[in-house]
Amino acid sequence: MSETRCDITLTVNGETVAETVDARKTLVDFLRDDLVLTGSHVGCEHGVCGACTVRVDGVIVRGCLMLAAQCDGANVETVEGVSDAGEIADLQKAFEQRNALQCGFCTPGMLLTAQELLRDGGVPSREQIREQISGNYCRCTGYHAIVDAIESVAEARAGGKR
Amino acid sequence: MKIVEDSPSLLTALDRPNSYIGRSVPRPNLARLTQGRAQYVSDVVLPRMAHVAFVRSPHAHARIASLDTAAAKKAPGVIAVVTGAELATVITPWVGVLTHLKGLKSAPQSAIAVDRACWAGEAVCAVVARSRAEAEDGCERVAVDYEELPAVTDPETALDPQTPVIHPSIGDNLCFERVHTAGDPDKGFAEADAVVETTFMFGRHTGVTNEPRAIVADWNPGDARLTVYQGTQAPHMMQNLFAKHLSLEEHQVRVITKDVGGSFGIKVHTYADEMATVALSKLLKRPVKFVADRIESFVTDIHARDHRIKAKIGVKNDGTITAWEIDDLTGIGPYSVYPRTSGIEANQVVNLTGGPYTCGNYRARARVVFQNKNVMCQYRAVGHPIATAVTEGLIELAAAKIGMDPLEIRRRNLIADDAHPSQGPSGIKFEALSNHEAMAHLDSMMNYAGLRAEQEQLRNKGIYRGIGFASFVEVTNPSAAFYGVGGARISAQDGATARLDATGAIFCHTGVSEQGQGAEAVIAQCVATSFGVSMDRVRVIMGDTDNTPYGGGTWASRAAGIGGEAAWQAGKALRQNVLAVAGSILQAKPDTMDIRDGIVVDRDTGKERIGLDEVARICYFRPDTLPAGVQAELVATRHYVPRAWAFAFTNGIQASYLEVDTDSGFVKLLKHWCVEDCGTVINPQLVDEQVRGGVVQGIGAALFEHCLYDNRGQLLNGNMADYLVPMAAEMPDIEVGHVVTPTGDSELGAKGAGEAGTAGAPGCVMNAINDALRPLSAAPLTDMPFTPDKILRALGKV
C-alpha cells in the first residue's frame, strides 16, 4: 500500500479477488483490464452513457464513477456473472427475440438496469420503463424495441402469457 | 406488447420451401452480445501490445514553434514519443479528393501534424506506453510552444478577401462548388401566386457511437504482415489505404473487424490518429492500441451537417409548385476527409432537394468551405436530412400560406406512382417509387383526421400540439457512380462465397460487414433460402480481408441489397453444384431435384433422396466411389453490383405528433410514424428497427444535438454531459409501415433501409413544431436544433 497503490479484496461474480490497484483506477477499468471482464463497457467515462453499469452490493452503479479502491470488501456483479447465474435469462432472450439490441455495446448495462426495475415484481408502465433506462444511452435502436422487450418480461414474470 | 415471433410474409415471389425471405427471424449469435461475451476492438489484447495517447492542439489554428519530448520520454511506462515529422518517415500524407466532384480540392493531411495544427483536437505528438494511463501521463510532459494563427470559423466570411486562407497552396478557402439549373426557375417563380423564402440552419452534430473509435495495429516484421483490428465499416477500403500510405502491398495487410459498437458513417473514414496508430506499430514493431476517449471523440470523430441554406419555393393557389431555389453554404473543417471527401453531402443536398416532386424548375448552388474546426464528412443519411427538411419545410410553409392541407399539397405535387421511371428536379433517376401509396397508408395508420380534430379541441384549452410530415427519397444500393468513378478504390460490388462443410452445413463468406444492423442475419437468410438449409446450418464469415471476397462493406444502405443479392446468388450456384454431384450419386438428372431443409429431394414430389451430410461424406471422404470424371465442386462464389440504375431510390413518408409547452419551450414527442418502401423486405423486424433507430437519430438532430463552437474555433460542449443525445424518456413510440416496390435490378429486389428514418425525421419534427405554433403567430422555426430558447424566442417570450 502506498499513496498511489491500494490493496483491495472483494468478491467479483462470486469469486474472491485480491489485487493491488492504482488508486486512480476506476472500477470499470479494473474489471476490464485487470480481471478481463470485458462485458462492462466504457462509453463516456463521465457517468452519462451507462455502458459501464455494474452491481455493487446489489445496487447498480456507474463503473466509471467509482474507483476500484472504493470496492474493498464489496460484492461486485457484472453482466458475465449475472448472465452465468441465469438471473436474466428471460430478459436476454426477450432482447434477442425482439431485436432490442443492434451493436450491443449498451446491452449489458441496459440489461442490468432493466433487471433492477423488474426484480421487485409488478408490471411497470412504458413510461416507467423509459424513466428507468433514461440513463442508459443507446444510439442504435431508438429505445422502442428495448421498452417492448422489458415490458414483455415484466408481463411474463407477473404470470402473463409467456 | 407483443413479441411477434414471425410477421406474415410480405411477398411470395421469392418463396421457396422453408424460405426465410420476408420473415422476422432473430439475428444469429446475439447471445454473445447479451451475455457480455462480444469482442469489440476496445476488448482486444495482444502480446507485447502498447497503448498510444495523443497530445492534441488546444488551438484551432497554430504553428508548432517547438516541441520538447525529453521529459515525456523519461516518464514511467513510456515506450516512445513520436512527433509528426518522425512519423512521416513511415507514412505518407493523403488528399481527400474525387475526380467526379469537379474542382474539389484539398490539402495534404498528415497522420500527426508536422508544423501546424489546423483544428483544436488535431494530434501534434504521440506517446506510446505500457498502459493508456501512462501514455496520458506522458502526454502531459510533452512541452509544445504554439504560435496561435488566426482561425477561420464562420463559413459566411470564409471566402471574403480579408479572411486568411487556411491552405495558401490551394489558393482560397473554397473546397467545392456546384451550380445546377434545371427547367426555367425564373419563369416558375413569375407564375407563382405565392413565394415563400426562408433560411434553414442545420447545426453541426456528430455520431456519438457508444463505442468510440478503436484500433489495434500489429506489424509483424517476421512475416512482413500488418494485421489491423479495427471497428470499421469498410475493411477492404482500409486495407488499400493502410497499404498505400505505409508502402506495403495490399496482400501484406489484413483488416479484421469483429463486433463494432455503432458506426452510422462515423467509422467509414480515414482518421489521422488511426493512421498514426498503424504507422506507430510499423515503427515500433509491436502491436499498438488506440481507443478514443469521449472527449477525443467529440473533437476528432467526423462532424456532420452544418449547412446554411437560403431557400425559396413558388406555388400557385391550387397548390401546384412552380419553382425551387436553394443556396447552400457548408463548412467542413480544414481538410476534405479522405477518401470519400467532404463534398459529397453538399452534392447530395443539390441532388435530393425537390425530392420526389414533379416541379422541374430548380436552381441550386452549393459551396463547401474550409474552416478551422473539426473535419466534417458523411454521416448516416448523408445530405438527406438537409434536402428533405428544406423541401418539406418549404412545402408546409407554402401550404400554410395558401391555406391548403399539408397532405393535400403533397398529393398534388408528388410524382404519380404509375409515372415511373421518372426523375426528380435535379435529374436523379427513379426506377419506381410509391410516394402516394405510402402517404395513403400513413394517413390511415395515424388516423390523420382524428388527430386534427383532437389538435383543434386541445387548442381551445391552450394546449398546442402539432402534426408534421416529411416525404422522402433515399439513395440506396449505390453503384460505382458513388465513389468508383471518382477514382476512389471503394468497391461498389460485393462477393459472397458459399461452401458446404463436411457435415452438410454452409459457410458463407461475405464482403459486407456487421455494425449491429443485422447484415449477418440477412446474409444467412438469403443463402439459407436459396441453397435450401435451415438458418442454424449457416455460419456467416465477415469482417476479415483475408477470408472474405472483396467488397465494399457497409455504408449507403448497401449491405442487404447488394451483399444479400450476392449471397442469394452464391447459394443458388452452390445448390446447382451439389445437385450435380447428387445426380451422379443417385443416377438422377440434377434438374429434377431440389435441396430443401438440408435434404436433396425430388423437385416435384418432395420425396427425400439423400441428406446433405451424406453427399458431403461421399464427396470429401469417399470420392473414389463417384463415377470416373466426376469432381464435386462444393464452393461457389458470386458477385453482384447494381448496373441498370446508379442508385436504388427508396421512398416513404414520416409523421410526427408533438406538444409544445409554450411557457417552457419544451417539446414533448407524442408519437412518430414512418411508412417506407425498401422493396423486398428480407427481414421485417430488422427493417423496422433500422427505421426506428434512424428516426431517433434524426430527432436528435432536430431537438438536441449541436456541436457548439465559439468564434475562436473552440468546441464548447464536447462531452456527453453538455452535448445532448436522445435518451429513452424523451423518445416516442414509433410505428412503422411498409409498401413493397422491389427493384428490378436484382433477383431479390431488396433496396436499403438504414437511413430512411434519419432522412425524414428532422424535417418532420420541424414541421410539427411550426404546425403547433402557427395559431400563436410564431415566426417559423427553421434553425436546428429546436431548443427551448429558440422556441421561446419564436414565440416572442424571451
Image (spheres, rainbow, N blue to C red):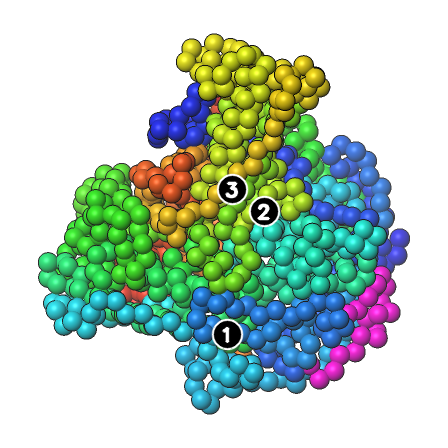
- Whether residue B534 is visible to the viewer of this picture, yes or no, is no
Name the residue tied to disc 1. Answer: B105
Taking B32 as reference, is B327 left or right?
A: left
Q: Work out whether mark 3 precedes mark 2 in sequence or the reverse, and give the earlier one.
A: 2
Circle count = 3
Name the residue tied to disc 2. Answer: B550
- Magenta segment includes B278: no
**Label 2 residue SS:** loop
Q: Residue B360, image x and y in percent?
A: 22, 62
**Mark 3 touches mark 1? (CB < 8 Å):** no
Name the residue tied to disc 3. Answer: B639
Task: Give the alpha-carbon distance from disc 1 to disc 2, as whole Å.
Answer: 29 Å
Task: Give the alpha-carbon distance from disc 3 to disc 2, as whole Å.
Answer: 9 Å
Taking B561 as reference, is B657 left or right?
A: left
Q: Work out whether mark 3 precedes mark 1 in sequence or the reverse, and give the earlier one.
A: 1
**Mark 3 touches mark 2? (CB < 8 Å):** no
For disc 3, the chain is: B
Q: Pick the quarter of the image with the C terminus of chain B.
A: bottom left
**Magenta residues, as a range?**
B64-82
The answer to which of B798 and B406 lies nearer the viewer is: B406
Establish whether labels 3 and 1 are both on one chain. yes
Q: Residue B686, image x and y in percent?
A: 45, 37
Q: Residue A112, image x and y in percent?
A: 60, 38
For disc 1, the chain is: B
Task: Give the alpha-carbon distance from disc 3 to disc 1, as whole Å.
Answer: 34 Å
Q: Residue B538, image x and y in percent?
A: 58, 28
Q: Amino acid at mark 2?
A: Tyr
**Label 1 residue SS:** loop
Q: Work out whether mark 1 precedes mark 2 in sequence or the reverse, and give the earlier one.
A: 1
Residue B289, located in which quarter of the rendered image?
A: bottom right
Q: Residue at x 39, y 29 (%)?
A: B14
